[in-house]
Amino acid sequence: MKPINVGLLGIGTVGGGTFTVLKRNAEEITRRAGRPICITAVADKNLELARKVTGGEARVTDDAFAVVADPEIDIVVELIGGYGVAKELVLKAIENGKHVVTANKALLAVHGNEIFAAAQSRGVMVAFEAAVAGGIPIIKALREGLTANRIEWLAGIINGTTNFILSEMRDKGLPFAEVLKEAQALGYAEADPTFDIEGVDAAHKATIMSAIAFGIPMQFDKAYVEGITRLDSVDITYAEQLGYRIKLLGIARRREQGVELRVHPTLIPAKRLIANVEGAMNAVLVQGDAVGATLYYGKGAGAEPTASAVIADLVDVTRLHTSDPEHRVPHLAFQPGQVRDVPVLPIEDVITSYYLRMRVEDRPGVLADITRILADSGISIEALIQKEAAEGESQTDIIMLTHRTVERNANAAIAKIEALAVVDGKVTKLRMEGL
Ligand SMILES: NC(=O)C1=CN([C@@H]2O[C@H](COP(=O)(O)OP(=O)(O)OC[C@H]3O[C@@H](n4cnc5c(N)ncnc54)[C@H](OP(=O)(O)O)[C@@H]3O)[C@@H](O)[C@H]2O)C=CC1
Ligand SMILES: N[C@@H](CC=O)C(=O)O
Ligand code: NA
């Protein structure tokens, strides 16, 4: 049967993995797709790299727009990244009637509403399994497998770089900067690694999942984003002592008044499966009203794991490209006319529990003053550690775990605690989830 022709834009980490896996497993992939999937053209700024990876088996150019305009190309795979030229190329490909496969979560979280609308009106597919949690088929699960459910919430370790950094820091005591360099060398990190460590990449992915889970538009600009750069290793240690692990979680939760959409370091009970997801591995927990809790685990970054998702999309598009667009699964699971403009709640309206660490004078009555403020705010304490002051020191650490309360209330109580003369400096606040 006539092959389907693919134009690959960007043959770096993921593009290289895609070329390699598609070639290695060509026979099985053809049997699955019903016809051969051939990368016939590759565009990359680095022509030498493109020639090396393709070994003369595809036409190579540095002009990505020429590939997008090529009438022989059926599917464009965008693996350049970023919101700049990638957006122009994707919109041009759609305009030219080509289906698109992309791993670009930044592009979709920020410009997805526009891109999916353009694809819908042109009758083409934009597939993006690789954009969330790399090789884990989480988009397939949310869009299709869980379609009977009212999804209540989801929470995931969806950035391999930061999970790798947190794991290596905890297990080997390695410094942050050194582990980040290793993650970059392994191909996990974004072109701009601040996207990883500041939580932006996880927020892109959480935004995409929230849209599919709840039938809402992409609202990346409303997401609360906090990365791991301000996380103090002393809190990792105290969390361990209290039976918790700290993970960078992306969380989306349906509430009556709107949706919580947030990324931040989070304490999780150490006995939970997700708390034991280490290195560059990802995991996403999804709570549906019918199915209950479901957990998806696997490699969220790297060349071949991500290629696995890109190729799954290529097979899907190959199978469906002659189908009536009306019969395809909608890009974001809900029919475009059924997307609801539900607001994303500000972080002050989030309801969760908290880890609080404060430096206090080591003298009688201090703990009573602090617990009184919490009690007056209706915040109950679940666990508490008071350290003995070190030899020759007059101050010590108090660590508390609270029960759930609205963040605005927790912040007001913390401000009162910080105003006490016996409390030195700021209170460290981390959010906790029981999951
Ligand atoms: N790495 C991973 O584990 C994962 C990545 N992703 C996503 O996949 C996408 C690709 O990431 P990754 O493979 O890591 O990135 P890389 O930087 O490794 O690859 C991108 C390639 O595109 C080339 N390029 C840049 N601009 C152009 C242009 N205008 N025309 C043609 N080629 C261009 C780059 O060349 P040069 O280097 O010379 O600029 C580079 O070779 C991103 O959207 C990323 O977020 C998703 C999941 C996992
Ligand atoms: N930089 C990302 C790559 C995959 O999306 C990560 O570290 O998870
Ligand atoms: Na995926």
Image (cartoon, rainbow, N blue to C red):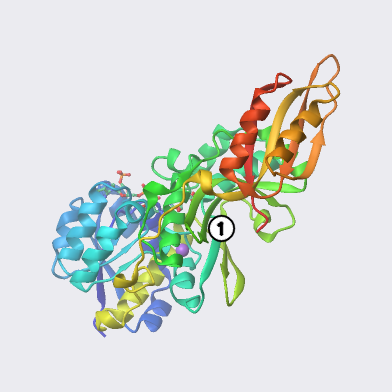
Position of residue 156 measured from the top left corner of the image (x, y, whole percent):
55, 57
- The image quarter containing residue 384 is top right
Q: Is residue 276 above or below residue 416?
A: below
Which residue is depicted at the point 82% across and 32% down? Answer: 386
Residue indicated by mark 1: 155
In the orientation shown, which residue stands out farthest toward the top?
392
Which residue is depicted at the point 47% across and 45% down? Answer: 224
Q: Is residue 8 above or below residue 183?
A: below
In the orientation shown, which residue stands out farthest toward the front?
376
Horizontal side of 236 relative to 185 (left or right) equals right
> For the residue marked with disc 1, what is the amino acid?
Ala
Which one is in front, 433 or 172? 433
Would residue 270 be visible to someone looking at this image? Answer: yes
Horizontal side of 287 relative to 384 (left or right) equals left
Position of residue 388 measured from the top left corner of the image (x, y, whole percent):
85, 26
Which one is in front, 329 or 410? 410
Q: Is residue 301 above or below residue 374?
A: below
Horizontal side of 356 relative to 22 (left or right) equals right
Position of residue 256 measured from the top left corner of the image (x, y, whole percent):
50, 61
* Secondary structure under the numbered disc 1 in the rendered image: strand
Which one is in front, 243 or 177? 243
Which residue is depicted at the point 65% across and 26% down? Answer: 418
Would residue 55 be visible to someone looking at this image? Answer: no
Which quarter of the rendering shows the N terminus?
A: bottom left
Binning the other alpha carbons within 10 Å of mark 1 as few (below 14), some (14 to 19) or many (20 upward) gives: many
